[in-house]
Image (spheres, coloured by chain):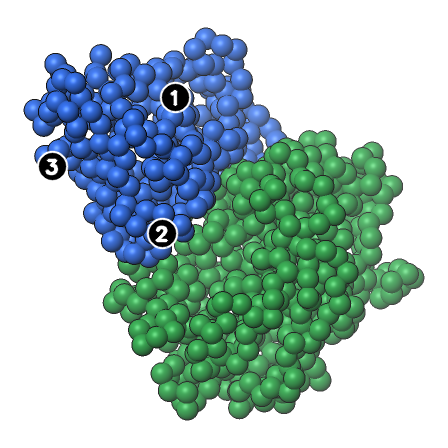
Chain colours: A blue, B green
């Protein structure tokens, strides 16, 4: 009989729970691990089959979800192990859920489809956005004015240069606490995802190295489809309220290094 | 790496117990007769790796070849499969018979290593399981090591994306008089199959379990099953023994050893490589020495056709270095690192020893990716694809040095690019007048990329390299007729594949003289 996996662990992150385990891979040869999950107390169901010893249960959305997992090992002859002992993980809640929106572009839904040029029109970027994206909240529309793909200097099709995406938004008054920025990505480049530099009204906020994706988000836009290879990732961080002012404020996202990333949504929220 | 000769011996003497029991013709296969589900030979028969005294015979029991769990609709128990080899297609003169075990561990495939046959002869074979009889296959043995046959007729094939088109090329190839077929990689593709890429007309959309990138053993098995349901693929397997190697899509696009372009960690990727290699072994007529152990598969091998030709089957994926500077196409200084290898140190040593030893007139080297230098910058700059041999110029230089010390005339057979290309292999790529040490014949795809055209936007790039003598962007295959004095190579094309029924054309014919390699175009 195939071995039961050991040391099953679950680590909650924003929108996803990372699983890892240990187990003999080759003798007997593992066909796959069948991962069973019970989400928020619902009935246990087959979640996924993978040959890897890791799995990212993604697409959990912005709410905190509690998931109980067990794994069955299936070998090359079709024999099944008894289930592993269970482990429970809880995903981290997004400010897109817990906060109140100040300005948002697109829906936080693991899809790029509502954004401009989505899901695969990146080749039109240089002609449709010759001066990059400059989006004013309340004036512009995501479907025409915020490109789904943010090119980087590694992208020949976008002129091999740094591109800036700008989000302008209005404030009646500076909030009492630091607001939070949420950038959800449906995918990034697999080997060269690069970094983004975030600034608020010209004040540098942070440089963020993006996670490696699957290099598919330039071509397809729905990370909720079964069997999708897209690898969503998330950037959420506090914006210094000292850099804000009443009236129009300007958030800039520069891409000084790497290839493209593909947006799901972007938003600024008051922190609860 | 143990040389093939020694590894075969070990397997046959029972050292590798698992391999012998698992479908390779050992007496331990007896005693598992019983009721077999009806019509289990849905995926045909095949033969491969011909030696002077034997050949590998393959089949699989799969009454429901597209059962989603990858087990072909077979109960989870072993079955005895009986085989017969005969001089004639009617099996009046049976010269060998025996049995092998079809077990669920290997998806009820069998790989019978028949020995004791006579050299340089045609044979016919078939299988029986329970009361079920398989289709008949034709195969042949190689000439003896000291014989000099008057000719060898071969074909090459690669890149058979089932979903992109019909295998009309195989339909025509199966009418040719062939001794061996060299398969040069991309037998399957790992991509999800759905409305975006199903260009093959007249077939139903495969079930949802095919609409996912293959990762598990079940998924890879299912992918082989789907492709092997094609009647023309079954016909060409039954027509001629195959020698096979892989390229990248048997595992994942552009992979290099344990490196994946989609960011999978090496530890996880090796688990995937293990199941991908297992499914490859299961579905092709390979010897037991190639049964993978975990993520390792002994695939590279050397066979011969008497004194006429040596066959060197290379593995250009399992041991290769990753991109020199992290990108596919560049001309980085790191490309020229003398340590870079596409074959790995062991395979390189084995290769150069073989080249030094051979007494054959011709050396046919099979490799998945293009070996000739192809500068992809049509202007004054230089750009190279690091996924091909161009990513490993130091390895290519070492190989060329070894080939220049040998009296055998090198002929490199490759695929990967879905285009017919013929190139002269130069001692100095920058000097068109420098000596030509061999020729490379790149066979176009069987199905990948759909209908194609006589040429396309990449044509000027390839033909901009003066040693490239042919570029054709149609689907098709290559045939070669090798004699002690010359090689006649023909590039065959079909005008379309998304619909069945296309006729075949000879797009180009070249003659290459032994000892004076060049591409002399006749057609």
Image-quadrant location for residue A135: top left
User: SS class of the residue under badge 1?
Assistant: loop
Q: x%, y% of residue B456? A: 53, 67
Q: Residues within 10 Å of mark 2 (few under 14, many from 20)?
A: few
Residue nearest the observer in this picture, A114 or B254: A114
Real-space CA distance between mark 1 and mark 3, rounded to the nearest whole angstrom: 31 Å
Name the residue rendered at 64%, 50% in the picture. B199
Q: x%, y% of residue B261? A: 39, 48
Confirm whether circles 1 and 3 share one chain: yes
Q: Residues within 10 Å of mark 3 (few under 14, many from 20)?
A: few
- Which residue carries the number 1 mark? A61
Image-quadrant location for residue B196: top right
Q: Could you say which disc has been placed on residue A9 in the image?
A: none
The numbered mark, 2 or 1, whose residue comes first in the sequence reads 1
Q: Which chain contains the residue that carries disc 2?
A: A
Mark 2 or mark 3, whichever is nearer to me: 2
User: SS class of the residue under badge 2?
Assistant: helix
Q: Which chain contains the residue that carries disc 3?
A: A
Q: Which chain contains the residue that carries disc 1?
A: A
Real-space CA distance between mark 2 and mark 1, rounded to the nearest whole angstrom: 34 Å
Mark 2 or mark 1, whichever is nearer to me: 2
The numbered mark, 1 or 3, whose residue comes first in the sequence reads 1
Residue nearest the observer in this picture, B469 or A239: A239
- Which residue carries the number 3 mark? A202
- Which residue carries the number 2 mark? A127
């Amino acid at each position: 009989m195939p071995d039961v996996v050991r040391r099953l662990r679950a680590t909650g992150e924003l929108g996803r729970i990372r699983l890892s385990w240990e187990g003999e891979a080759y003798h007997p040869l593992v066909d796959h691990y069948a991962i069973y999950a019970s989400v928020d107390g619902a009935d246990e169901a087959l979640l996924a089959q993978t040959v890897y010893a890791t799995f990212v249960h993604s697409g959990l959305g912005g709410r905190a979800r509690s998931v109980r997992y067990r794994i069955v090992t299936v070998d090359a002859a079709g024999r099944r192990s008894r289930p592993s002992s269970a482990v429970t993980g809880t995903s981290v809640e997004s400010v897109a859920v817990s906060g109140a929106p100040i300005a948002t572009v697109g829906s936080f839904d693991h899809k790029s489809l509502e954004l401009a040029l989505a899901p695969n029109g990146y080749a039109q970027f240089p002609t449709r956005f010759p001066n990059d994206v400059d989006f004013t909240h309340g004036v512009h529309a995501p479907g025409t004015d915020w490109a789904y793909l943010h090119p980087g200097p590694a992208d020949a099709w976008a002129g091999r240069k740094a591109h800036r995406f700008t989000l302008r938004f209005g404030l009646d008054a500076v909030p009492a606490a630091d607001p939070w920025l949420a950038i959800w990505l449906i995918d990034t480049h697999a080997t060269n995802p690069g970094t983004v530099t975030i600034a608020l009204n010209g004040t540098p906020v942070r440089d963020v190295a993006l996670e490696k994706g699957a290099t598919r988000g330039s071509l397809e836009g729905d990370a909720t489809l079964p069997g999708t290879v897209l690898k969503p990732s998330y950037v959420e961080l506090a914006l210094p309220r000292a850099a804000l002012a009443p009236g129009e404020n300007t958030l800039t996202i520069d891409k000084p290094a790497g290839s493209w990333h593909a947006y799901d949504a972007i938003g600024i929220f008051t922190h609860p | 790496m143990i040389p093939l000769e020694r590894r075969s011996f070990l397997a046959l003497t029972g050292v590798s117990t698992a391999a012998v029991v698992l479908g390779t013709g050992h007496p331990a296969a007896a005693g598992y007769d019983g009721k077999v589900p009806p019509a289990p030979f849905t995926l045909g028969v095949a033969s491969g790796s011909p030696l002077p005294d034997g050949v590998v015979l393959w089949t699989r029991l799969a009454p429901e070849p597209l059962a989603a769990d990858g087990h072909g609709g077979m109960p989870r128990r072993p079955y005895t499969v009986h085989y017969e080899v005969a001089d004639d297609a009617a099996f009046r003169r049976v010269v060998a018979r025996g049995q092998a075990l079809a077990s669920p561990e290997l998806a009820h495939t069998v790989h019978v290593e028949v020995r004791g046959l006579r050299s340089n002869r045609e044979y016919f074979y078939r299988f029986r399981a329970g009361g079920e009889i398989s289709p008949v296959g034709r195969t042949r043995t190689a000439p003896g090591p000291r014989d000099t046959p008057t000719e060898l007729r071969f074909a090459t094939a690669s890149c058979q994306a089932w979903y992109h088109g019909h295998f009309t090329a195989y339909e025509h190839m199966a009418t040719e008089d062939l001794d061996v077929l060299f398969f040069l990689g991309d037998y399957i593709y790992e991509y999800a199959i759905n409305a975006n890429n199903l260009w093959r007309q007249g077939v139903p959309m495969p079930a949802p379990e095919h609409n996912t990138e293959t990762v598990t053993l079940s998924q890879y098995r299912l992918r082989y099953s789907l492709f092997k349901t094609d009647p023309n693929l079954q016909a060409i397997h039954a027509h001629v023994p195959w020698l096979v190697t892989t390229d990248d899509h048997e595992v994942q696009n552009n992979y290099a050893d344990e490196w994946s372009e989609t960011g999978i960690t090496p530890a996880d990727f090796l688990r995937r490589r293990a199941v991908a290699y297992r499914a490859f072994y299961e579905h092709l007529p390979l010897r037991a020495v190639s049964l993978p152990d975990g993520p390792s598969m002994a695939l590279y091998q050397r066979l011969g056709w008497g004194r006429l030709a040596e066959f060197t089957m290379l593995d250009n994926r399992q041991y290769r270095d990753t991109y020199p500077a992290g990108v596919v196409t560049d001309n980085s200084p790191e490309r020229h690192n003398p340590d870079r290898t596409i074959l790995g140190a062991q395979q390189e040593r084995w290769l150069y020893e073989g080249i030094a030893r051979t007494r054959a007139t011709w050396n046919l080297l099979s490799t998945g990716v293009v070996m000739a230098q192809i500068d992809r910058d049509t202007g004054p700059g230089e750009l190279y694809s690091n996924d091909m041999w161009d990513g490993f110029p130091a390895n290519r230089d070492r190989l060329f040095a070894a080939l220049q010390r040998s009296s055998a005339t090198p002929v490199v057979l490759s695929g990967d690019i879905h285009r017919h290309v013929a190139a002269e292999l130069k001692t100095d790529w920058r000097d068109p007048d420098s000596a030509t040490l061999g020729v490379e014949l790149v066979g176009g795809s069987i199905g990948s990329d759909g209908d194609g055209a006589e040429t396309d936007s990449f044509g000027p790039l390839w033909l901009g390299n003066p040693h490239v003598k042919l570029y054709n962007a149609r689907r098709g295959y290559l045939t070669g007729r090798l004699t002690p004095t010359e090689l006649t190579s023909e590039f065959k094309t079909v005008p379309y594949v998304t619909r069945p029924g296309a006729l075949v054309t000879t797009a180009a014919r070249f003659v290459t003289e032994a000892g004076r390699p060049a591409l002399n175009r006749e057609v």
